[in-house]
Amino acid sequence: MQSNLTTMRYFIITGISEDPQLQLPIFLLVLLIYLFILSGNMTILIACQDPRLHTPMYFFLGNLSILDMSCSTVTLHKILLCFIAGDRTVSFTACMVQIHMFGSLAGVNLLILMAMGYDRYVAICRPLRYHMVMSPGVCVTLASVCWVLGFLQVTPFTVIICGFSCYSSNEINHFFCDIVPVMKISCNDTSFLETLFFIEGLLTMILMPFLLTFASYIFIINAIIRIGTSSGRLKAFYTCSSHLTVVTLLYMTLFGQYLTPNLSGTLESKKLFALFNTAAVPLLNPVIYSLKNKDVKRALKNDSVPGQTPGKKFGYLDGPSN
């Protein structure tokens, strides 16, 4: 432990647990989860190369798979390295890079899910205009804006925290460098950063995409209710059920990770929420999107569908079955 440091050269990551007897089980579990994340999301990316899946939904799903693999690599790699090399230290520069990368990828993830919600809104509420509204150019522009905005939003936080020169400890009670636990060990005045984190981080980066995605589903549910047949309502619901499930899981973990009271008793629970966010959600995404998805299964098996031409753009009426 170090106190009143004027120059921080490295931090020590406590990890998920400090119990020596749990290190091997944790390592094996995280390794298994990480391998499943990589294989599952790579499978989605391979399936999305099929011409029949060159649609807005699968274009955004491909972006989501890249984000899941990247975010898991950024956060989980230290757990694996700690066990293999026995070194829990991380340099100051590497810690700042990890803070920036995790925050940026998480921000892009929320924005991509918001874009996917808009895609489902157009498909169900404006099916006749779907091909025109969600054209390839529009999809590429939306995805590009999500990636650029996601990385720009986190830049002010990284710049400010890089300027901190005093820390009461070099031990971070987490399994990766996240902005909140790093702020907790700083003896600099963090009031401005906390205010910025609340206004821009929680309200803009988390709450705004949540509200816009929620608004999309208000219109979607209203449109589904007005569908005349039960089979039509069921098909419309299945079209957005996978996305809705992923959105619900992700926001529940984010709210638990960042919006619960900052009490000492909740520190361990926040780590569990962070672990679920960075490991379980990316693991579940490929399962949720492809387990019952006939289009993905056909693409992986290279099966043809009678009457369906490669590269066909679809809305919810002739879209995938999730």
Image (cartoon, grey):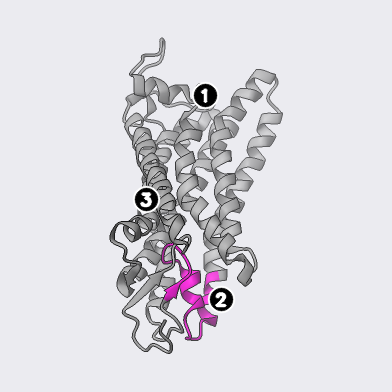
Question: Would you place residue 161 above or below residue 3 in this image?
Answer: above
User: To which residue does mark 1 refer?
Assistant: 321
Viewer-nearest residue: 37 or 308:
37
For the point 70% across and 21% down, which residue is it? 228
Q: Amino acid at mark 2?
A: Thr
Question: Would you place residue 172 above or below residue 28 in this image?
Answer: below
The image quarter containing residue 217 is top right
**Mark earlier in primary sequence (2, 3):** 3
Q: In whole angstroms, how far apart are the C-alphas of marks 1 and 3?
A: 27 Å
* Residue 180 shown left or right of residue 265 in the figure: left
Q: Which residues are magenta?
A: 171-197
Q: Nearer the viewer, mark 1 or mark 3?
A: 1
User: To which residue does mark 2 refer?
Assistant: 195
Q: In whole angstroms, how far apart are the C-alphas of marks 2 and 1?
A: 44 Å
* Disc assigned to residue 144: 3
* Residue 264 shown left or right of residue 33 in the figure: right
Q: Secondary structure at mark 1?
A: loop
* Disc assigned to residue 35: none
Q: Amino acid at mark 1?
A: Ser
Viewer-nearest residue: 258 or 146:
258
Q: Amino acid at mark 3?
A: Ser
- Categorize mark 3 by other alpha carbons within 10 Å: few (<14), some (14-19), many (20+): some
